[in-house]
């Protein structure tokens, strides 16, 4: 099995073509940190997805995925949320496309960047409040809604892969909710 | 009659005290640009309030108001929206307090700053999506929902006071919706 | 002649490969608005580049270019500035990679997006203060340092292509310098 | 001795008047995180100030201070940097006044807010690169330039007061330099 995820197939890109373009140009990604807000808009919970990788073990990540050819960023954000959280999540797609952070993923370890053995990606990171019901989908085992304090715990951060521990810390900081 | 607005009175500050502090320190304000979003999160309409000032004529402004002592910014945002748009507006209070702009108002005309004859104010500007029903309240005559193109028309911009024409242009730019 | 710019060639990508990947995935770009600041940090001048396209006429644009495979964003920003402004420009590369805007370019006209007949690109837009000497390079005929008011004039905006008129307006708004 | 700092005196505000306005309205503040950048713009060091408070012990803080009546934000940023780092610091005053965070300080402990026993303040937080020579001034004992990793150490964070540990973490996250 390849590590190409289901949504990377389809009319747009075969695994061979994806492998080819990954050796030619950086990929455009979106990283989405799903959150529950209190009624006054302040951060209540951060959603972390538990995945079970082929390599074994358990990984925590945020929602992350590729932007397809001719796909608007807002559509990519909505599509990846639906893929991981299901169709009833009722996300509030950002009114502004200004991301709170831009993450660079490189195949090799680079200081100040995240790592993705598959590719070089440039990822726009958004916080997306989710008001509806969520049900882990596809390769997501479970979605855990953690308090900011829980999400920052060493044990949780240690389970985060691809730099997503730092990404979640940055999202919590951006929302003014560091303890 | 004074130009002190109703919400500046109350247990916290008499007109005399307000006059006094205005001669001593800058005031903290919030500027709120209410918007209607399309289902994909993109900007549909910008809300501009029509006011009838004592001086005569008609003014267009966004929602703008003072932050009270010990009042959290999120509460001030919610309060001023309710004051101008009524209790059924269902605003999405920002998850992050990072404003898209900071506006400085000075009593005298200063390049790059807005003007407010009453005071020196530092105002945090937010775009706030509004999902519910709005009804102009208090000293607001009417709320007009304009397309980005309409809001940028010279005639509309000319009716905007206190720099709110530039503020609306900046909000539309921040939302990626300049024509 | 192709519209592939010189810096897209090199060890990384032949014109054929570039054409291929452009039909497969969105390209990662950076848009850089060069500015001169006053000593207090406020905006003095905006730099617009005058280009002479094969099609004839004159175009105004900001600095814009592709991010290469394995190239950090900061390096891409520095490289494209040097390509257009020369090696003595002394740009202040942004400390934070949070862009002030994200621009989407599509081959077809799409509301709220910019147009680029060659490709789908996602571009991170930065304002970069430039302290040194600049000399238009490569396919740039001239760099004009305009006041914010001049840059917003209809005649100047009409010469801007690829949505760069709106991009410059957005940069001026972001810097709080709309007249 | 009063806890009024020297720069709050002067023509504008006596201690009595300052006490009075503090009981009436929130104060406008700026928080400045001074940083050293590498030549590519990435974060090298974070500056933390060591202060010796009347209460004894040692405190670490960033640069923080009040905005005076009729004082532009850029001038307040420059003035507070000069007060703490001396006249040769050569700070790069921000081109945009959009802060990376807005901090609320309340006299009582409030979740998600910082604490300041003296007052309610709303503070705009900026990262300011400093290129020149710094010398701790006034009530600052010393300025320590720490690597991001050092600044995030528990021992250092424990010496930070007024929420400035979280503020520094947020600044490091904003600069994409969380380890």
Image: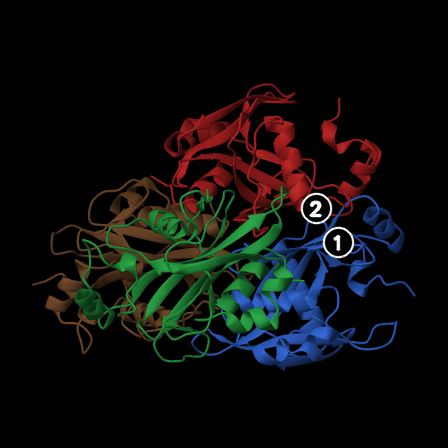
Chain colours: A brown, B blue, C green, D red
Image-quadrant location for residue B78: bottom right
- The N terminus of chain C appears in which quarter of the rendering? bottom left
- Tell me if C169 is positioned left or right of B87 in this view: left
Farthest-out residue, left? A1
Residue D87's label in the rendered image is none
For this rendering, which residue is in front, B85 or C39? Answer: C39
Residue topped by disc 1: B110
- The C terminus of chain C appears in which quarter of the rendering? bottom right
- Tell me if B42 is positioned left or right of A5 in this view: right
Q: Chain of mark 1?
A: B
- Tell me if D24 is positioned left or right of A174 in this view: right
Q: Position of residue D160 (x, y in %)?
A: 51, 30
Residue topped by disc 2: D72
For this rendering, which residue is in front, A90 or D89? Answer: D89
Q: Chain of mark 2?
A: D
For this rendering, which residue is in front, D150 or B77? Answer: D150
Q: Position of residue A3 (x, y in %)?
A: 13, 61
Q: Are marks 2 and 1 in contact (CB under 8 Å)?
A: yes
Residue at 63 percent across and 30 percent down: it is D82
Residue at 67 percent across and 40 percent down: it is D76
- Vertical comparison of D54 with D12: above or below: above
């Amino acid at each position: 099995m390849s590590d190409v995820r289901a949504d990377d197939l389809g009319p747009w890109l075969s695994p061979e073509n994806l492998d080819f373009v990954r050796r030619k140009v950086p990929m455009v990604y979106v990283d989405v940190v799903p959150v529950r807000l209190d009624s006054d808009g302040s951060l209540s919970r951060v959603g972390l997805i538990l995945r079970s990788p082929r390599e074994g073990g358990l990984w925590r990540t945020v929602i992350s995925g590729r932007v397809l050819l001719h796909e608007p960023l807002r559509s990519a954000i909505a599509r990846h949320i639906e893929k991981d959280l299901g169709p009833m999540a009722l996300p509030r797609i950002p009114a502004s496309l200004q991301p709170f952070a831009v993450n660079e993923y490189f195949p090799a370890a680079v200081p100040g960047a995240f790592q993705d053995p598959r590719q070089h990606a440039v990822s726009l990171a958004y916080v997306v409040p989710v008001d509806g019901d969520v049900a882990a989908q596809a390769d997501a085992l479970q979605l855990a809604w953690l308090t900011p304090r829980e999400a920052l715990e060493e044990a949780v951060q240690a389970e985060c892969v691809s730099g997503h521990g730092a990404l979640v810390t940055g999202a919590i900081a951006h929302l003014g909710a560091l303890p």
